[in-house]
Amino acid sequence: MKTIMTALLCASASFFSLNGFCQDTCQAKLHSYDEPQATPAVYTLSLGSTTGGRLYYYGAQHITQPASAQFAEIKKAWNEFQPTIALFEGPDRGIADSDTATIRKFGESGYVRYLAKEAGIKTISLEPPPADLFRYLVSQYGQQKVELYFLLGEAMRLRTRLQYNREQIEKELLTMMAKMRQLAGDSILTRSIPDLANSFRLFWNNDLQWWQAPQSWFDPLKTSEETGGIFTNDINKLSSSFRNIYMLRQLSALTNKGERVFAVVGRNHVAAQIDALKCAVR
């Protein structure tokens, strides 16, 4: 699986036009989501480069409760580490007026942005360019399934993390469809909420509604057959693997450049990247 994945990803020339990164043997040390995952009590990694750069990598749970111990852990690590640059998972959705309001609305990625703004340091998303990820996934699964994957995944995120109702979810997804149109152009298939509902029914002809897609459908450690996601888990697994390569490159390049890099990401990504980062940070 890992060899096939590397070959497929390296074939994406627009993504891997950067210094022959596909030939880096460290990339081969990324763990596939088909492998048994180690489950350490805390998903953290601290590495140093011969340039003086340092990396502190925290694997977080995707939660929005300010009282959770993980936010105190992140703040403590931040204060001790004194980063020069901070990286977060997902797009830059901004911050709120306070740390607690930011956590409630934007979770751990927003909290990193909040801490960075307070410290006056630069932030960067860990994510690859959206167009590259979208094109790659479409090349493997077709556009209809990929559009559904992204839209259903966002509906799930809004429902489970922010407790949005259907009306609120629909409003956000219309904005997302407009952004997807920028990626796909005239080939976009899902232009409205009725389009989304109709596409959903092509694959899931049961009592479930599109805005009720369960969180388990987007777990890369499970198969679509196990969860009933039909294809969502498999796309998530491929997307996560693609993103891991980009994260590895960003984190190692910045650390080897001499930066003090503080990064927070979903804990499964840390488990998948640990051995590759130990190789790449020199």
Image: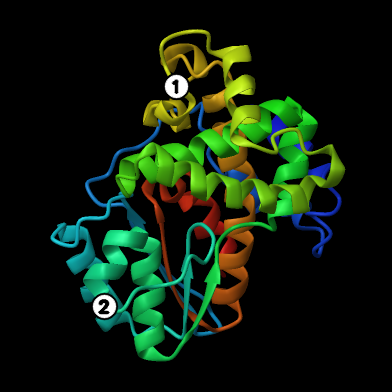
Image-quadrant location for residue 146: top right
Seen at 78% across and 36% down, the residue is 7
Q: Residue at the top extreme?
A: 205
Which quadrant, please, contains the N terminus?
top right
Question: In the image, is residue 130 above or below residue 11?
Answer: below
Residue type indicated by callout 2: Ser
Question: In the image, is residue 261 above or below residue 152?
Answer: below
Seen at 61% across and 28% down, the residue is 194
- Which residue is denoted by mark 2 in the rendering? 98
- Which residue is denoted by mark 1 in the rendering? 209
Task: Tell whether 27 sits left or right of 58.
Answer: right
Q: CA distance from mark 1 to mark 2?
A: 35 Å
Image-quadrant location for residue 221: top left
Question: In the image, is residue 56 above or below residue 145?
Answer: below
Q: Which structural element holds mark 1?
A: loop
x, y percentage for residue 241?
A: 59, 41
Task: Tell whether 30 sits left or right of 56.
Answer: right
Image-quadrant location for residue 102: bottom left
What colour scheme has been applied to the protein in the rendered image? rainbow
Packing grade of label 1 (10 A; few <14, some 14-19, many >=20) is: few
Which of the two discs, 1 and 2, sits closer to the camera? 1
Q: Earlier in the sequence, mark 1 or mark 2?
A: 2
Seen at 71% across and 36% down, the residue is 137
Seen at 46% across and 87% down, the residue is 121
